Image (tube, rainbow, N blue to C red):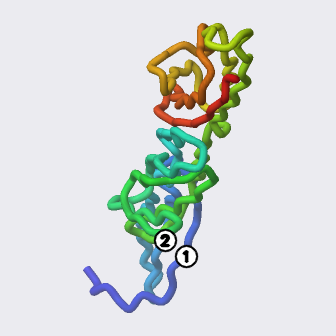
């Protein structure tokens, strides 16, 4: 058998697409200076499609309170992943979030990148207003207060300075009364009224 001589050219004679893992599979023919021919198949692969999504969020419990959190998940690509949250943070979960929109960047081991967007909401501000109805006569305890809560997260609980837990206390003597309103998330608002 004659010795193999120097290869003078490499020619690709066909391309075939194989999805999703095998990207392309070129069929090569190799001819040396003596016209001897051989073929070879080269397989080029690619990682799975790299993507991400927000897997869970916890919204802020009270208006103006920054205790929300968001968790991101990545799929495909090549592990390990790196996470970059606005304001710092490199974990899958970002805590201490105020209401707003947050874009997290994730990169894989090949430095491919993807983005995920988390939205944190907050309830309306908790409010409380109180309107008093005066007693009809001196030393007669038939006054009352009408309390109106709003915002926050219902249901509400009430704690009056005279020990009453009613939303609208009655049979009140003349005096000054204050109340703390607490919503279902533990947010509070205060109000008061004077019964004459």
Q: Name the residue rendered at 61%, 10% in the picture.
A: 141
Residue 69 in picture, x, y percent from top left: 46, 47
**Image height of 137 relative to 105, above or below:** above
Instruction: Give me the C-alpha separation between circle 1 and circle 2.
Output: 5 Å
Image height of 63 relative to 143, above or below: below
Number of marks in picture? 2
Is residue 81 visible in the rendered structure shown here?
yes
Residue assigned mark 1: 11
Residue occupying the point 73% across, 24% down: 131
Residue beneath disc 2: 29
Which is more toward the observer, 90 or 41?
90
Instruction: Give the camera-side residue of 41 and 37.
Output: 41
As drawn, the label of residue 35 is none
- The first of marks 1 and 2 along the sequence is 1
In percent of width and height, residue 192 lies at 62, 32
- CB-based contact (under 8 Å), mark 1 and mark 2: yes
Q: Is residue 4 left or right of residue 123?
A: left
In this rendering, does residue 75 appear at all? Answer: no
Q: From the viewer's perspective, is residue 168 above or below residue 88? A: above
Query: Outermost residue, front direction?
Result: 138
Q: Position of residue 87 (x, y in %)?
A: 50, 68
Secondary structure beneath dot 2 equals strand
Label 2 neighbour load within 10 Å: few <14, some 14-19, many 20+: some
Q: Residues within 10 Å of mark 1 (few under 14, many from 20)?
A: few
Q: In front here: 67 or 113?
A: 67
Image point (60%, 26%), residue name:
175
Looking at the image, residue 160 sits to the left or right of residue 169; the answer is left
The N terminus appears in which quarter of the rendering? bottom left
Q: Nearer the viewer, residue 128 or 164?
A: 164
Answer left or right for 87 relative to 171.
Answer: left
Secondary structure at numbered mark 1: strand
Measuring from the top left, give residue 97's x and y in whole percent: 50, 53
């Amino acid at each position: 058998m004659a010795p193999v001589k120097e290869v003078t050219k490499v020619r690709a004679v066909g391309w075939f697409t194989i999805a999703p893992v095998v990207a392309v599979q070129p069929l090569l023919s190799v001819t040396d200076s003596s016209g001897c021919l051989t073929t070879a198949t080269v397989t080029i692969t690619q990682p799975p499609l790299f993507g991400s999504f927000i897997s869970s969020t916890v919204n802020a419990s009270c208006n103006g309170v920054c205790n929300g959190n968001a968790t991101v998940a990545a799929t495909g690509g090549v592990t390990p992943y790196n996470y970059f949250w606005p304001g710092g943070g490199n974990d899958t979960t970002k805590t201490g979030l105020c209401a707003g929109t947050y874009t997290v960047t994730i990169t894989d081991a090949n430095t491919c990148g993807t983005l995920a967007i988390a939205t944190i909401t907050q309830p309306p501000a908790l409010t409380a207003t109180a309107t008093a109805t005066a007693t009809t006569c001196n030393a007669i305890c038939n006054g009352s207060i009408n309390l109106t809560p709003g915002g926050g997260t219902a249901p509400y609980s009430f704690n009056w300075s005279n020990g009453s837990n009613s939303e609208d206390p009655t049979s009140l003597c003349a005096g000054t009364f204050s109340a703390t309103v607490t919503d279902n998330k533990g947010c509070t608002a205060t109000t008061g009224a004077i019964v004459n």
